[in-house]
Image: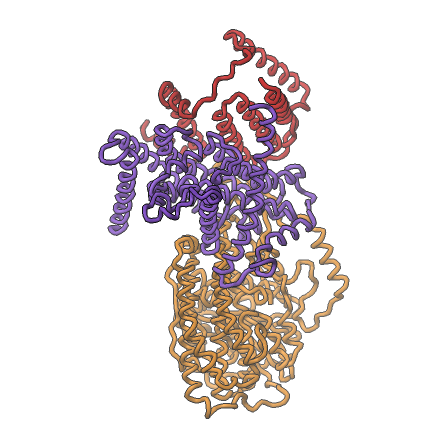
Amino acid sequence: MSVGSLIAFCILALVAIFGAFRMLTSHHPVHSALYLVLNFCATAGIYLLLTAPFIAIVQIAVYAGAIMVLFLFIMMYLNLGFTRDILDDKRRRWVTLVAAVLLGALIWMGAALHGAVTLPANALPPPYKVEEIGMVLFGTYALPFEVASILLLVAMMGAVVIARPQLRAESDTKKEAAQR
Amino acid sequence: MGFWEGLWRMALAPLVVLMVVLTTVPLWIWLERRVCARIQQRIGPNRVGVMGLLQPMADAAKLIFKEDITPAHVDRVVYLLAPIIALVPSMAALAVIPFGDLQAADVNIGVLWILALSSLAVYGVVLAGWASNNKWSMMGGIRSAAQMVSYELGMSLAIIAVLLTTSVYAASHGGHALSLRTAVNSQQGVGPLAWNFIWHLPAFVVFIIAAVAESNRAPFDLPEAEQELVAGFHTEYSSFRFAMFYMGEYVHMTTLSAVCTCLFFGGWLSPFAGIPLLARLNVSTVPVLMYLAPLFWFFLKVTLFIFLYIWLRWTLPRMRWDQLMALGWVVLLPAALVWVAVVTVLAGAGKVVDGFVFSGDGWFRLLSLLAVAAAYLIYRRRRGSS
Amino acid sequence: MSETPTEQVQSPSAAVAQLDASLRAACPDDVLELSSLGDSPAWTIVPAAIARVGARLRQAGYDHLELVSTVDRGEQIEIVYLLDSMLHRTDPRRLALRCVVPREAASLPTLCGVWRAADWFEREAFDLMGVTFTGHPDPRRILLPDQWQGHPLRKDYEYDSDTMVQEILDAELNNDDLAGTDGHAEHDGMVTEDLAVNMGPQHPSTHGVLRLRLRLDGEYVRECDPDIGFLHRAFEKLGELKTFTNGIPLTDRWDYLNAMGNNMVHCQAVEAAMSLEVPERVHWTRMLVLELNRVASHLVFIGTYGLDLGAGTPFLFTFRDRERILDMFELLCGARLTYNYLRIGGVAADLPRNFIADRVRPFLAYLPDRLAEIDQLLTGNQIFLERTKGVGIWPAELCVSYGLTGPLLRASGVARDVRRVYPYARYDQCEFDIPVGENGDCYDRYIVRVAEIRQSLRLLDQICAWFEANEETTRGQISAKVPRVIKPPAGEVYTCVETPRGELGLHLVCDGGENPYRYKIRRPSFVNLGLFGEVARDQKVADLIAILGTTDIVMGEVDG
């Protein structure tokens, strides 16, 4: 890892941690969302350093660009007010801390079992082409990919049905009719 | 690439972007004011500089020296940050545009980079609307979020359709499938006949409409619809913060026009290239013009698209919010989806019969023309019968 | 004043006698005496029975409450209702009802249940004359601030301006809650939050200082309460304070896009009160300027309506064409907006030489091409059609009940035009069609006005022809013989003209003095806006603008 990359990594990592921390401690949901976006962008930067530009771009386009915009949209639409600070609640603070430590331990254990906690000095993969990702995604893993999309589709339809009481009412009456 | 070289490139890239922004944005503003004046049978600004060319400078000077007001009830940090967020992603997106040989950064996934940053651009508008703590501004912000997320889908699909044929080219000629440079190179041939806007007509139309919506320009300027929302998301902004939104809009227009030029209009390629009788006009052998000609063609094409933006804005009434959403989701998205499917099949068919009378590319072009013509005929017949 | 300054009808026509008999038969104890108001019969009604008699007449076909006027008669206050018919054919077409209530207890039942137009008329009567209407659904002041004390049109009105203005300012400035608070509403089984917002009085699309208090549910308007009066300049009070001649310049300021029509209604009313006949040339000159003014006003409408829908260019196109009309008016009277051109018994100045040939005729040849241009830019535009067709449909019955007049009414298919129903000047000698709409949507309200411009051009062609035939023989005959001091005899008249916004009427009560005793204006913009609160409900915000744009209100006229 060159000096430049190391400096860049340190800066990005600090920004990412700062973003994550402030996301938790912010008083307003919109601020939290913005800190999360900051965290996403810093993470995308780290992906770039790992010569994984495709993942980096997808991270920005999908998470920062689409999902968080929808979050903001909902927050603004429902006009969510100021929330009580989670960390103000003493008991919650401890529960959160313990949960975080446990999660960290879990990840470390999982990684340790596969023996990939520390990267070897030149473990960076060579720059790859997007075409290769495409071949892997739609060739080798085509079935899991399609299953995942169907799962998302089902979830989305479920959300629509829950959000629209008329639809629910109609399906209820149909069910009743079927039972009779 | 050593540390110093990296640093040098890091410094150079913003410089190129800044140069492009600072030279084009005032030009577009001037063009907008003069063209809109002509459309409205007025003369337009003609006092500052020759033909009023310095008018944008005068505007900028005025805006900078105006009082910068931060209302008391706003969310201060987000309010101050929003104009910056509105401007920076559009400028960063310019970095991967190849203006001929001039390019800040030749990223091999340039198209993705542009899509990612253009999806970030919505933050400026949404946050400005929210932070202003003004009900009309917030409605502008909400509309904007919905609009930009919706039209991004149609636009991405239109781009994907083009990338499919570009990747076929990249496979045979080398180069990265997602680089804008490859996209331009794949359109070399007999002048404009080789450009994608003919062979990808549906994608081109979808892209143009989505681009206008993405940059919040009339007839899709709902986030700042004056007649409904006063000035929408930037109602509370004044002075240079307002100027940044204003600039951001033009930079966004420039970026999208440049992408459109690269993907559909042959980028820096001369319209005369490859045409036998006009071969003498081909200047690629003259030393200085060799470098200037591509720049000239590129900027001419971008200007054409900017002119299209201006033309639309001063001619059409504004659409309604729900009509806009319907257009995005019910018309553009399915149209783009269908076209992606058609291109996949046709390009595949072209690959199979490659070399039979035509090349694979030639087959694709022939079939795509037939497909569009068939779709048009079916539409005419159904319309005639109903 | 104790005596009632109305002349007894000499020989009531058969129709009036018949209606009189049937009214007395149906409501024997309610109907008192039969008098007249101008040319129309007028029945005096027992105040407590006004709603009953009103409902009876509504059934008999008097579906249009034209005006609610009030007159301070000293010990008593007289309320005058003018009824007319739109969808039916009644004989007599127009009639008046009078109620006399004691000054100290000026109260009578509301007519809101019979004609919806009564809502705003009665609020105005309460605001300015202090008559309360029992059972009124919304008995607030309408033009003056809520903190106002007293009722200015009463003859004994006095007020302490300094303290009251200070109180009003304090109340307004300390009101943090201008739009009202956001609330919760439940629908579709989901609790949603309503957004209370102010649209106006400073808003680009409210056409002046109109304020709409909106309650929004997302992009939908759930409640709309128009708040008017920001531009109230007390024209009715001023009218009483000025002599008949000095009142003319004031009329320019009511509906400033139609100053000629305002001049006309004032002069016509005074002439009617004086039984003054004006020369033939004056009639045609007046028609010339009235029709030109109508074209100018409708051009402003087309331009601003385009602007309301986000199209900026048609605005400049129509203002360019309107400029030519303003140039003509400038030649005529030196003014471009407030003309002060008509005079009692005539007009201020004769047409300049060759005015018709050099100015009007070229304009008549010029405008049709420009209208075709507008048709290309707006009328045929797909986005424009989608924004206007099927948006804001007003059924004819609703319009009639709210007393709408002018293009708004005609767009809903009711072919009522004052120029045809109660012809004035020489409109009865001219040929013109009354364009009507089919659906009563925004598109129809727009297209009816475009068609009216074409009809005006047709009228102007006939007017030009009259001038071309009679220019030399009538030149200089621009005024009747008018006494130096104008003192119409005691009496009252109601006259009306068709302005671009509808029926502009003037209920003029004279007591034989140099000033009007009562100067009640029927302001079409005011009446037309009365319906807005109802039709705005459940519209999208964007459609609200599109609908408000078609009402083509001028706030100077709404606020009086």
Q: Is residue B296 visible?
A: yes
At x 61%, y 58%, the residue is B48
Is C486 left or right of C87, judged from the image as shown?
right
Q: Residue C189, percent across and down?
A: 48, 36
Residue C95 to residue B115: above or below: below
At x 50%, y 68%, the residue is C320
Q: Residue C275, percent across and down?
A: 53, 86
Q: Residue C1, percent across and down?
A: 65, 79
Q: In front: C267, or C474?
A: C474
Count of numbered labels shown in the rendering: 0
Q: In front: B222, or B97?
A: B97
Residue B2 to residue B284: above or below: above
Is A152 left or right of A9, judged from the image as shown?
left
Q: Residue B76, percent across and down?
A: 67, 39
> In the picture, residue C452 is in which quadrant?
bottom left
- Coloring scheme used: by chain
Q: Colour of chain C?
A: orange
Q: Colour of chain B?
A: purple
Q: In front: C100, or C141?
A: C141
Q: Residue furthest bottom?
A: C473
Q: Quadrant of the C terminus of chain A?
A: top left
Q: Residue furthest left?
A: B357
Q: Is residue B256 visible?
A: no
Q: Quadrant of the N terminus of chain A?
A: top right
Q: Colour of chain A?
A: red
